[in-house]
Amino acid sequence: MLQLLFSGRGRLITHLTGWALVTLATYYLVLGMMPAGEAFARTVLFICFPIILFYTNARILTNRFFEAQKYGHWAVLAVLLWLGMAYLRVQTELAVFGSTVFSNKEMPVDGGRNVFMVTVVIYFVLMIFSGLYQLLENRRDLDARHAEAQLSYLKAQINPHFLFNTLNNIYAAATLQHPRTADMVLRLSDLLRYVTYDGQAQTVPLDKEIGQIRAYIELFQWKSEHPLPITFNIEGDTAGHPIEPLLLLPLVENALKHGNLESATEAFLHISLQCSPQHLLFTVENSFDPDNQQKDEQGGVGLENVRQRLSLGYAGRHQLTVQSEGRIFKAQLRLNT
């Protein structure tokens, strides 16, 4: 919810809604003291100055001076802005209407002293609020940029890991003079195109990720002389589901790399994907030999990479469970889409 409110469009809507509510409240307060036409005109005048004060303090003074640690310049300019805007607001009201909102029959023109003191207090609170708001917004934007940079790093990290494993598969087929080695190289080209271009996108259609999973399984199948016991079942409608690229594929890659499909007669790899309008459940279950586990030098980049990406891109919207019982390894990912 907060991410929606403080995104680009959500932030604009939040600001417009806030100022609209302040304007409405001000109008009804002034309306109790004078006719509707004059109350509306004074309200427009009253709102213009706080808006200028708020964004001048936030966007200019806070960003260019306070964040740059030029505290002396910031303090002087902040005081000038605070008192100067309060003075201009009162003098403008006197010049336009000939009196302030606090004028009455006994004192038709109060000289602006009372309203100036009230305005000074209100603008002081507004200065504090606008400064704190901008500082929090800056920190939130900084965290978002940091998360985006870290996510880009993780996506880049998976590319060589994926490439090395796939090239190993093709190398194994080439050493056996597999007749479909050329087809495997062509399929690898398609996979690399997905990794290089689509893999850099924020999201891709789920069907694209499924297509790459099938292609990777096919590559793995081709290097074996006999069909391997691999199943991939899909339930539900996969259309219209956006997903981060290369999020599901590493789970399959991990199962193929560390499973025992080519060395045990009772080996298996079962992959299932269940889709609903709000949820996605991806399960990878494979057999393995606990006495003969070969880890790559990176120490299992795939699963750890997925965990970190989920914590950044799907915070609060995912559940990844990994369990190993006997000779069966199971990874299950649930996403709220």
Image (cartoon, rainbow, N blue to C red):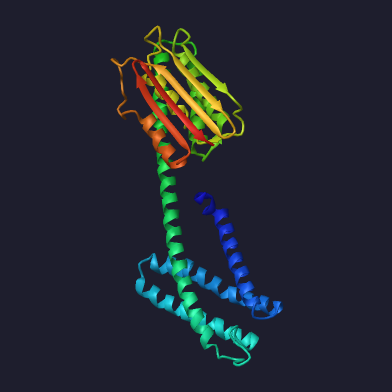
Q: What residue is shown at x 52% (from left), y 86% (from top)?
A: 114
Quadrant in which residue 78 is drawn: bottom left
Q: What residue is shown at x 54% (from left), y 57% (from top)?
A: 11
**Camera-side residue: 149 or 88?**
88
Q: Residue furthest bottom?
A: 106
| Relative height, residue 181 to residue 11 (above, below) | above
Quadrant in which residue 13 is drawn: bottom right
**Camera-side residue: 246 or 7?**
7
Give x and y (percent) for residue 178.
Answer: 45, 11
Give x and y (percent) for residue 216.
Answer: 48, 22
Give x and y (percent) for residue 259.
Answer: 38, 17
| Quarter of the rendering occupied by the C terminus | top right
Q: What residue is shown at x 46% (from left), y 63% (from top)?
A: 133
Q: What residue is shown at x 41% (from left), y 33% (from top)?
A: 306
| Relative height, residue 323 to residue 145 (above, below) | above
Res 245 seen here: no
* 293 with respect to 26 (left or right): left
Quadrant in which residue 100 is drawn: bottom right
**Camera-side residue: 52 or 107?**
107
